[in-house]
Image: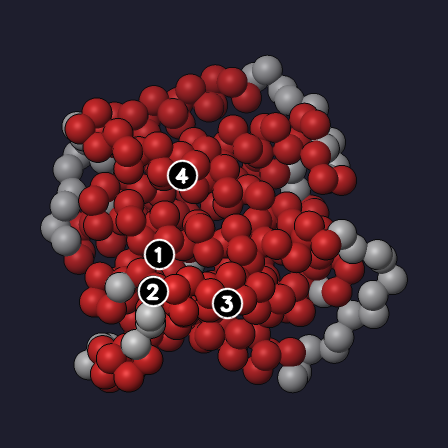
Amino acid sequence: LITLMVMFNSMLAEKGGHLLSLMVLHCVGIGTASCILLFVKKKQNKIKGSLLWYSAGMVGVLVVYFNNLCFPVLGASVTLSLCIIGQSLGSIITDTTGIFGMTKHSFNKKQIIGFFIIFGGIIVMVENWHFRTGYVIIALVTGLLVVLTMIFNSRLASCVGVFQTTRINYVTGLICILPIALIYDFQLSVSLETLSNMHPLYIFGGGMTGVFIVAGINYVVPKLPTIYTTILLFTGQVITGLLIDYFMVQDFSIRLV
């Protein structure tokens, strides 16, 4: 789902610009989460949450924007593979330190072998990476930010519930985007005309899949070590990324496998 969301958002950004992509993503996300909440029992807030946990949506804006930048240049599989390096580093720090109140998990030295295999495979996948150093760095930072949003959202979900947190995530993100839209003189009429000429899947796909991504991660993160969650997410993302590269842009080689 993450790979599909990135694809939908990047295509929307390519046609209508990054700002339009972000605004549509968050508006659709708020609408989808609100519809789901009509059928989901609201969780009673028995735990006092930190204001910091409400900032996940703002960090998520950067994640989406950075993905939109890297996806057309590096390709789906490479972008997501580089992100996973950043996520892995962030996950190890989270598990070993228990930062932001997360459960501590000791690091098993045997896991180092697995990480070398993963990182070695990613390095092989990246062709001519030294000519795109800026995008490589952005993709790595994006991975670190993903872990941060996972932590904040999962902590908030323990207070107010999974889908309520998901909606809050999109609301705070939209609040962050609106001042930017005013600064850059966002033209609503032009944007609506652009959307009218686009496939509905690109308009609604990113926001709708995003809701289930955020909700799923909110549910899983407290139950597994962060590093295992990251690796499992990575497996699904890279496989889907390879399929997208092959079927949509015909960019595929045995090296990527």
The picture places residue 242, in percent across and down from the top left corner, at 26, 46
Q: Which residue is mark 4?
A: 83
| Identity of the residue drawn at 28% across and 45% down | 70
Which label belongs to residue 184?
A: 2
Q: What distance separates the C-alpha of mark 1 from that of mark 4?
A: 12 Å
Classify mark 2: helix, strand or loop. loop
Describe residue 255's horizontal placement relative to residue 123 as left or right: left
Can you name the residue that lies furthest to the left here? 250
Q: What distance separates the C-alpha of mark 2 from that of mark 1?
A: 24 Å
Q: Which residue is mark 3?
A: 174
Q: What distance separates the C-alpha of mark 3 from that of mark 4?
A: 23 Å
Residue type (three-letter) at the residue carrying disc 4: Cys
Q: Give the mark nearest the N terminus, 2 or 3.
A: 3
Classify mark 1: helix, strand or loop. helix
Foreground mark, 2 or 3?
Answer: 2
**Rendering quarter of residue 197:** bottom left
For the image, the number of numbered tags is: 4
Image quarter in which the N terminus is found? bottom left
Image quarter in which the C terminus is found? top left
Q: What distance separates the C-alpha of mark 3 from that of mark 1?
A: 18 Å
Q: Which residue is mark 1?
A: 6
Residue type (three-letter) at the residue carrying disc 2: Tyr
Describe residue 69's horizontal placement relative to residue 232 as left or right: left
Q: Give the mark nearest the N terminus, 3 or 1.
A: 1
**Rendering quarter of residue 17:** bottom left
Above or below, 25 against 56 in this view is: below
Residue type (three-letter) at the residue carrying disc 1: Val
Above or below, 164 against 189 in this view is: above
Q: What distance separates the C-alpha of mark 2 from that of mark 3?
A: 15 Å
Q: Give the mark nearest the N terminus, 3 or 4.
A: 4
* Residue contact at pointers 3 and 1, CB within 8 angstroms: no
| Identity of the residue drawn at 63% across and 20% down | 108
